[in-house]
Image (cartoon, rainbow, N blue to C red):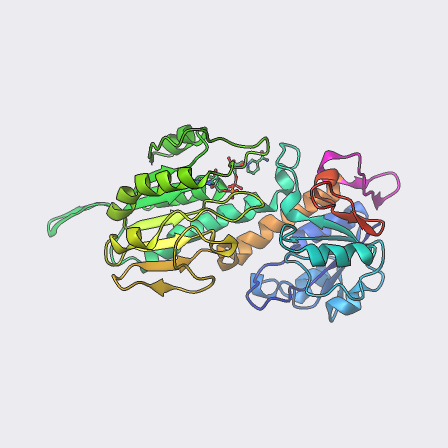
Amino acid sequence: MKKILLCKENDERETRTALIPADIKKLIQMGFEITAVKGTGEKSGIADSEYEAAGAKLVSSNEEGYKGAEIVLRIMKPESIDGIEKGALHLSYLDPFNERELLDKMASAGLQAVSLEMIPRTTLAQKMDVQSSQTSLAGYAAVVNAAARLPKILPMMVTPSGTINPARVFIIGVGVAGLQAIATAKRLGARVDAFDTRPVVEEQVKSLGASFVKIDLGEMGQTDQGYAKELTPEQIKKQQEAQAKVCERSDIVITTAKVFGRKAPRLISKDVIDRMKKGAVIVDMAVSTGGNVEGSKLFEEVVTENGVIIMSGDMLERQVPVDASKMLSGNFTAFLTHFYNKETKELDVRLDDEIMKGCLLTQGGSIIHERFK
Ligand code: NAD
């Protein structure tokens, strides 16, 4: 397996590409053959001629490229898999917990489908971890968006005309996105509070110069992959009450709380929003998985009756496609390199490898992953 197709994304809102020319050059030198669909890099500022100069062959459409492609790369889940050849290794996000039908189709078509979401969170796989590379950019963008929308500035200013107090930012959920949001808000001069149900996070929050909001919810913690454990309804109620006061005094609230493979917890209800300041901004980064915030809408901004602005925080990495594509391309390149066999000059789908075992969902006509069988 060495013939790679770099697809063009179908979603109009998508701005990123899965491979940039610098990495294409490296992969070709290694022994891969690469075909790219025209226009794939356009929104990341990369011209077709740059792909060609890096050694890629160009085709006009995904469908044209599927012929002969042994490895198919794209970012978002495919709208259609028609034309992809049997046995091809297909790499993309698959949203596997919600896309049973797609998994069945990919299995029936004899594809070897890799789900980017399922790449294990191990030290070895860190450089392939698209979740981390993309959500950290999203955490940055969330703060920048909120700051631009807020009717006040973030830093403290002491001037002859008067003193301005720093804005207060509250980050709920301090994983990859939350940490980057804290760092960004601090750089902009805000006073930052943060909370997460995983107790290990407190140290990280403090090391970034933010305050950790202490809420005792009893049994909390994390899975061996570093993900939060799901809370009981009673624990969520307790959390909502305890953090309400922090929300009320905050100018910006950014929520990133997710539970892997499950619906996101509802953490901010309307009655708390009703008590927040006019002009305060909330960014719900869990909006596509159920939403942390009552009333948040995917890809839309909502202004409540009392003037609180609720912004959609989904896929914010698409606002910075130059960096997002560079990091994604690094992730894909690391994956392809890891499974490349220098002797045969082919990519091996090695199921005895923990990384492949963790993220390969279909093979030989069936769903093979334990979690989705
Ligand atoms: P995520 O996107 O699943 O969740 C975001 C955050 O929300 C997490 O920190 C989670 O604890 C938190 N959360 C869940 N429920 C909450 C609630 N009710 N209230 C407040 N917060 C809540 O997680 P993530 O950002 O992808 O990463 C989680 C952890 O995994 C991080 O510590 C990260 O450093 C670690 N990680 C490790 C590796 C690796 O070892 N290779 C790679 C990536 C991430």
Helix, strand or loop for the magenta stretch, by majority: loop
The quarter of the image holding the C terminus is top right
Foreground residue among 212 and 40: 212
Foreground residue among 286 and 272: 272
- The residue lying furthest to the bottom in this view is 60
Q: Position of residue 307 (x, y in %)?
A: 26, 62
Foreground residue among 159 and 152: 152
Residue 167 visible in image: no
- Left or right for 93, reference 214: right
- Left or right for 192, reference 40: left
- The residue lying furthest to the right in this view is 344
- Left or right for 330, reference 132: right
| In magenta stretch: residue 354 | yes
- Counting every numbered tag in the picture gives 0
Q: Position of residue 286 (x, y in %)?
A: 47, 51
Q: Is residue 281 above or below residue 258?
A: below
Point 74% across, 66% down: residue: 62
Q: Position of residue 14 (x, y in %)?
A: 57, 63
Point 42% across, 53% down: residue: 284
Residue 164 visible in image: yes
Foreground residue among 9 and 234: 234
Point 75% across, 63% down: residue: 81
| In magenta stretch: residue 120 | no
Q: Is residue 364 above or below residue 85?
A: above
Q: Position of residue 3 (x, y in %)?
A: 82, 55
Task: Give residue 313's quadrant in the image.
Answer: bottom left
- Left or right for 117, reference 311: right
Q: Tell me where the magenta segment starts and ends, as one range.
A: 339-355
